[in-house]
C-alpha cells in the first residue's frame, strides 16, 4: 500500500527514518552501580558518578554491554568486536557533567535488518544503520514550583540503546509496523521492556518528502515521541506541512521539531545542530570496548526463539495462516498461551478461539494476557468438550462467556446448566416432527424448490431444543424427513 500526498506540483512520497531510544534492562546504570527502577523517589538513585562529582570515574556495566549485543543479534546485525565511547558535549541543567557518554564513529552494533508485516499481508525489510550505547540524561521538572525548575537525576546515566534505522520507511503504517516489531523483538530478547508510557522506549522521527525518483530532500527530526499512535500522527502532520512549504515556493530547513498531540501539528523547537557542534571526542576515562568472539557466540547460542522464527514454526507445524501466526507471535505471552491451548488439540480451532472470543474478552475487560480471565488450560478444556461432542459450537460460545464471568471451568458450567449436547435421536426426531408440522406452508415452499428454507428448519429445530441439539444429527434428520414427505 503506497502512501502519497497530492499537490499542485505532482505526487509526493514520504521518507522516514527512526531513531529509537530503548532503555536496556539492567539493575544498575551504564557506568555506575546506582539502581534503575522506575518510579523511585526523585534523586534516590544517583551515585557520585551520575552526579558528576569531581574525580569520579565511570566503570562499564557488563550486563548493559551484553544487552546491546543480544539486541544486535536479534536485529540480524553485525556485532563490532571493537567499539569506543565518545563524549558528546552540550550544556543542560539535567546533564551534570556537561557531556553525554555515547558512541559516535565506532558503535557496538553495525548494520542489520528488521522484517515488518503490513496490513495487506505483504512484508518489508527495514535496514538498521547501527545500534550504539549511551547514557540517558536526568529529568527537568518545570511544573512543580512557581519560579524554580527541579531536577531529578534518577534517570541520569541509565543505559540506552539507540537503534537507528535507514530512511527505508515510506508511510505512517510502515513506521507503526516497524516500531511494533522492534518492540516485540526487544521484549522477546528481554533487553528492553518496550514500555513507551514509562519512557523506556522513545522515538525520534526523521521525515522528508520528495517526488518519486528524486534524491532525498531535507529532513526534519521530531523529537521524543512517546507512543506509536503519536509517531504515525506526527508523520502525517509533518509530511503535509513540508509539502505545503515546498509547493508554496519555500524551503524546508533541517531542524528539530516537537509534536503537539493535542493540536495534531509539529512545531519548531530549535535549528538542527551538526555533529561538529557537539565536539565529539573519545572519552579519556574509558578504554575501547573489546569483545571476545566466544563471548558473543555464547550470547548468540542462548537467545530465545524470536518472533520471525516462531511465526515460521507456527505456520509450518500448526498450519496457521501468515496473518494468524503473526498475530499470535507478536507477544511472547500470547504465543505461549496459544501453544498451551493447541497442545494435543486441533491447532486451527485453537487459533480461532484465541484470536476470536478470547482476544475479544480481553479487550472488552481491558485485561492483559498475563491477567487473563480464562487460563489456557481452561480454554483447552472447553475445546475438549466440543471435540468429544459433549457440547456444540454454539453452546461453547455461551459456556466461554460464563467461564469469563465466573472463573469456573467448562465442564462444571456445562453440568451446572445442563448444556450437554442432545444426541438422543428420539428427542431430535420429535423436535423435527414438531417443527415440520407447525410450518406446512414453509414445507411446501421448500418442496417446490426454495432450498434456502433448509436453514430456517435447522434454526427452528435448534431453538426448540434450546440450542443443545447436535447440529449434524439435526441436519441429517431434517433431510431424511423432508425427503420422505416429498415421496
Ligand atoms: P543525527 O545524529 O543527525 O540525528 P543520525 O544518523 O543519528 O543523525 O540519524 C539520522 C536519521 O535520519 C536516520 O534514522 C536516517 O534514516 C534518517 N534520515 C536521513 N536522511 C533522511 C531523509 N532525507 N529523510 C528522512 N529521514 C532521513
Ligand atoms: Mg539523531
Image: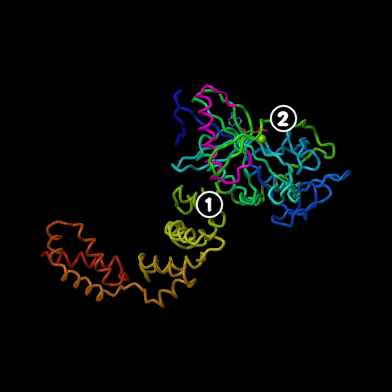
| Residue that lies at the very extreme toward the top in this rendered image | 249
Q: Residues within 10 Å of mark 1 (few under 14, many from 20)?
A: many
* 426 falls in the magenta region: no
Residue denoted by label 2: 275
- Considering the image in quadrants, where does the N terminus appear? top left
- Considering the image in quadrants, where does the C terminus appear? bottom left
| Residue that lies at the very extreme toward the front in this rendered image | 146
Q: Residue 106's x, y, as percent?
A: 73, 34
Q: Nearer the viewer, residue 307 or 85?
A: 85
Image quadrant where residue 273 sits: top right
In the image, residue 442 above or below residue 70: below
* Tag 2–tag 1 contact (CB < 8 Å): no
Q: Earlier in the sequence, mark 2 or mark 1?
A: 2
| Residue that lies at the very extreme toward the right in this rendered image | 55
Q: Quadrant of ligand 2?
A: top right
* 237 falls in the magenta region: yes
Judge depth for marks 2 and 1 and give the one in front.
Answer: 2
Q: Which residues are magenta?
A: 223-252
Q: Residue 249's x, y, as percent?
A: 52, 21
Q: Tell me which secondary structure the magenta stretch mostly adopts.
A: helix
Q: Nearer the viewer, residue 300 or 16?
A: 16
In the image, residue 428 above or below residue 326: below
Name the element at disc 1: helix
- Residue at 52% over, 50% down: 313
Q: Residue 181's x, y, as percent?
A: 56, 45
Q: Residues within 10 Å of mark 2 (few under 14, many from 20)?
A: few
In the image, residue 484 above or below residue 254: below
Is 123 placed left or right of 388 in the picture? right
Q: Residue 13's x, y, as percent?
A: 49, 30
Q: Is mark 2 within 8 Å of ligand 1?
A: yes
C-alpha distance separating marks 2 and 1: 40 Å
Residue denoted by label 1: 329
Amino acid at each position: 500500500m503506497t502512501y502519497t500526498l497530492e499537490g499542485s506540483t505532482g505526487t509526493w512520497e514520504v521518507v522516514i527514518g527512526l531513531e529509537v531510544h530503548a532503555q536496556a534492562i539492567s539493575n544498575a546504570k551504564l557506568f555506575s552501580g546506582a539502581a534503575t527502577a522506575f518510579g523511585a523517589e526523585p534523586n534516590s538513585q544517583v551515585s557520585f558518578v551520575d552526579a558528576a562529582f569531581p574525580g569520579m570515574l565511570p566503570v562499564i556495566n557488563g550486563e548493559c554491554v551484553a544487552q546491546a549485543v543480544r539486541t544486535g543479534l536479534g536485529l540480524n546485525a553485525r556485532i563490532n568486536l571493537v567499539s569506543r565511547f565518545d563524549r558528546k558535549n552540550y550544556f543542560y541543567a539535567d546533564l551534570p557533567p556537561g557531556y553525554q557518554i555515547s558512541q559516535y564513529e565506532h558503535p557496538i552494533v553495525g548494520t542489520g535488518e528488521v522484517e515488518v508485516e503490513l496490513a495487506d499481508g505483504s512484508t518489508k525489510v527495514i535496514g538498521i544503520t547501527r545500534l550504539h550505547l549511551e547514557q540517558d540524561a536526568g529529568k527537568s521538572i518545570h511544573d512543580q514550583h512557581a519560579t524554580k525548575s527541579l531536577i531529578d537525576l534518577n534517570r541520569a546515566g541509565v543505559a540506552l540503546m539507540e537503534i537507528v534505522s535507514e530512511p527505508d520507511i515510506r508511510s505512517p503504517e510502515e513506521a507503526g509496523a516497524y516500531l511494533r516489531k522492534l518492540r516485540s523483538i526487544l521484549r522477546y530478547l528481554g533487553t528492553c521492556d518496550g514500555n513507551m508510557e514509562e519512557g523506556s522506549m522513545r522515538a525520534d522521527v526523521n521525515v522528508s518528502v520528495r517526488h518519486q525518483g528524486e534524491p532525498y530532500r531535507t529532513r526534519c527530526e521530531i523529537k521524543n515521541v512517546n507512543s506509536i499512535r503519536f509517531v504515525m500522527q506526527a508523520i502525517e502532520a509533518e509530511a503535509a506541512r513540508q509539502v505545503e512549504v515546498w509547493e508554496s515556493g519555500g524551503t524546508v530547513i533541517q531542524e528539530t521539531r516537537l509534536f503537539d498531540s493535542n493540536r495534531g501539528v509539529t512545531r519548531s523547537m530549535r535549528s538542527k545542530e551538526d555533529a561538529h557542534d557537539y565536539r565529539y571526542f573519545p572519552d579519556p576515562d574509558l578504554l575501547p570496548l573489546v569483545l571476545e568472539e566466544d563471548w558473543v557466540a555464547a550470547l548468540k547460542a542462548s537467545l530465545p526463539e524470536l518472533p520471525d522464527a516462531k511465526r515460521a514454526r507456527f505456520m509450518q507445524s500448526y498450519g496457521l495462516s501468515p496473518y494468524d501466526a503473526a498475530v499470535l507471535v507478536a507477544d511472547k505471552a500470547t504465543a505461549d498461551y496459544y501453544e498451551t491451548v493447541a497442545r494435543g488439540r486441533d491447532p486451527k480451532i485453537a487459533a480461532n478461539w484465541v484470536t476470536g472470543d478470547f482476544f475479544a474478552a480481553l479487550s472488552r475487560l481491558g485485561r492483559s494476557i498475563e491477567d487473563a480471565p480464562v487460563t489456557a488450560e481452561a480454554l483447552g478444556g472447553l475445546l475438549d468438550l466440543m471435540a468429544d461432542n459433549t457440547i456444540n459450537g454454539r453452546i461453547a460460545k455461551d459456556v466461554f462467556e460464563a467461564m469469563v464471568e465466573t472463573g469456573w471451568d467448562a465442564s462444571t458450567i456445562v453440568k451446572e446448566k445442563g448444556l450437554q449436547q442432545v444426541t438422543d435421536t428420539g428427542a431430535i426426531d420429535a423436535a423435527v416432527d414438531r417443527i415440520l408440522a407447525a410450518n406446512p406452508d414453509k414445507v411446501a415452499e421448500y418442496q417446490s424448490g426454495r432450498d434456502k428454507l433448509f436453514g430456517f428448519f435447522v434454526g427452528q429445530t435448534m431453538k426448540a431444543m434450546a440450542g443443545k441439539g447436535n447440529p449434524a444429527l439435526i441436519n441429517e434428520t431434517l433431510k431424511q424427513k423432508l425427503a420422505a414427505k416429498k415421496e
